[in-house]
Image: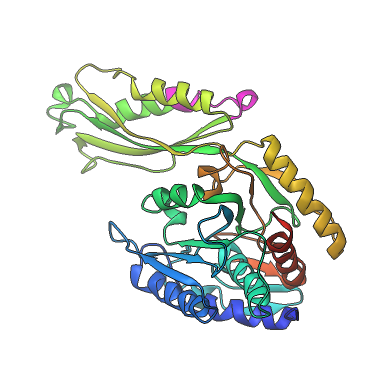
């Protein structure tokens, strides 16, 4: 089978990048789903569009024409990005040496395109793998996979292996473990009053929130691999009014589900410092931790051997960010970070390394060929 050149792969990826597809713009994400759907239909695959919910775009499920209901290889990708429409003006598609720039090119249109191409170079020859190959492209990974999680978990029921086309880390490392996450919205409600003439009558929602934030942030414990971040806060109405309301976001990251359960229960049961101000916490676990199990180590060892045959060294790593692989890693052998090498996810210097395209695509293809 003929391997596409780096230039051919890059051209295909850049065509996808031209379709800006932030999670919040369902119409543009649908455009991406249309593009991918048409390619797979041309390969005689079974293609199913899963309707979107809560204002999100649909998801795309694809199955190879062979293998039936047998457990197979699940390729997980997302076609939404974080960059708002118009980012192409600030981060134009361009090439500088080995770096190719563009919004979403690294996270993760590059990897999604390589996964599709790896399959296409096999399917176009009439070759069939030992296992059925299935793809799931979701539309809301960048906002926590709130509408796609159930479809990811359902797809996992028919999987023997899971390959995630998220980008590589730190110079091409593959991901064999990720932190879990929990998200919350904290709210305080006090009593408004004029800050000059009626200060004594007021009860500050912001003051209560400040005390809660200090207490909660102090729970960060690097020895236990548990971190806390309050990333956004909003409250008050005017400078001369005791604030009645305050809202803040809260993010937990952890490696252990035991630690997660402990800290989630703790924060959900906190009391107010001031009994005249109410304090509530809504939210919970968003992604379980992706812990490196023995079956994951075995799958990595297999991939490492294939990479050596191709001509590069594959190194495993743990990373702090979550992915859709988190939802399946406790039950299945999952390899993540199989996508392009590069840097700058979610930034205006986001880019992939052109030299990584052919080797990474070949690795995905060899995994499809050799897993059984």
Residue 92 pos. (x, y %): 56, 78
Front residue of 139/105: it is 139
- As rendered, which of 17 and 298 lies closer to the eye? 298
Q: Does 229 appear in magenta?
A: no
Observer able to see residue 133: yes
Residue found at x 36% / y 53%: 147
Residue 79 visible (yes or no): no
Picture mark count? 0
- Residue 311 in which image quadrant: bottom right
| Magenta span includes 224 | yes
Q: Where is residue 325 in the image (x, y as percent from the top left)?
A: 56, 48
Q: In this view, does 63 lie above or below 121?
A: above
Question: Relative to residue 315, is residue 216 drawn left or right?
Answer: left
Span colored in magenta: 215-225
Please, is residue 248 above or below residue 168 in the view? above
Task: Answer with left or right where residue 27 lies relative to residue 118.
Answer: left
Query: Residue at image x 64%, y 80%?
Result: 124
Q: Quadrant of the N terminus?
A: bottom right
**Quadrant location of the C terminus?**
bottom right
Residue at 52%, 79% (x, y): give it.
39
Percent x, y of residue 211: 37, 24
Query: Residue 107 at what x, y percent from top left?
Result: 57, 62
Left or right, residue 197 beside residue 253: left
Nearer the observer, 281 or 195: 281
213 versus 87 height, above or below: above
Render colour scheme: rainbow
């Amino acid at each position: 089978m003929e391997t596409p050149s780096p230039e051919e792969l890059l051209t295909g990826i850049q065509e996808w990048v031209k379709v800006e597809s932030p999670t919040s713009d369902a119409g543009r994400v649908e455009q991406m789903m249309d593009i991918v759907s048409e390619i797979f239909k041309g390969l005689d695959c079974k293609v199913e569009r899963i309707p979107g919910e809560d204002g999100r775009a649909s998801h795309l499920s694809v199955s190879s024409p062979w293998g039936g209901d047998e457990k197979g290889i699940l390729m997980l990708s997302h076609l939404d990005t974080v960059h708002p429409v118009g980012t192409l003006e600030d981060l134009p598609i361009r090439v500088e040496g080995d770096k190719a720039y563009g919004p979403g090119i690294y996270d993760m249109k590059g990897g999604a395109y390589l996964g599709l191409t790896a399959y296409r170079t096999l399917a176009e020859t009439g070759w069939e793998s030992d296992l059925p190959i299935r793809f799931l492209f979701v539309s809301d990974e960048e906002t926590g996979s709130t509408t796609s999680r159930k479809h990811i978990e359902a797809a996992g029921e028919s999987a023997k292996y899971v390959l995630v086309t998220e980008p590589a880390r730190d110079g091409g490392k593959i991901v064999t473990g990720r932190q879990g996450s929990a998200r919350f919205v904290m709210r305080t409600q006090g009593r408004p009053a004029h800050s000059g003439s009626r200060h004594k009558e007021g009860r500050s929602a912001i003051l209560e929130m400040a005390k809660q934030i200090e207490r909660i942030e102090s729970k960060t414990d690097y020895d236990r691999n548990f971190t806390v971040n309050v990333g956004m806060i909003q409250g008050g109405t005017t400078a001369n009014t005791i604030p009645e309301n305050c809202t803040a976001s809260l993010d937990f990251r952890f490696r252990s589900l035991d630690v997660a359960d402990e800290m989630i229960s703790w924060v959900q049961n906190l009391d107010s410092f001031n009994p005249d101000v109410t304090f509530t916490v809504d939210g919970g676990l968003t992604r379980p931790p992706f812990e490196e199990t023995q079956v994951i180590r075995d799958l990595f060892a297999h991939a490492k051997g294939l990479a050596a045959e191709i001509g590069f060294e594959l190194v495993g790593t743990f990373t702090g960010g979550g992915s859709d692989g988190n939802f399946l890693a406790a039950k299945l052998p999952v390899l993540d970070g199989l996508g392009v090498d590069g840097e700058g996810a979610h930034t205006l210097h986001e880019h992939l390394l052109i030299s990584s395209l052919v080797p990474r695509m070949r690795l995905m293809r060899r995994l499809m060929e050799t897993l059984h």
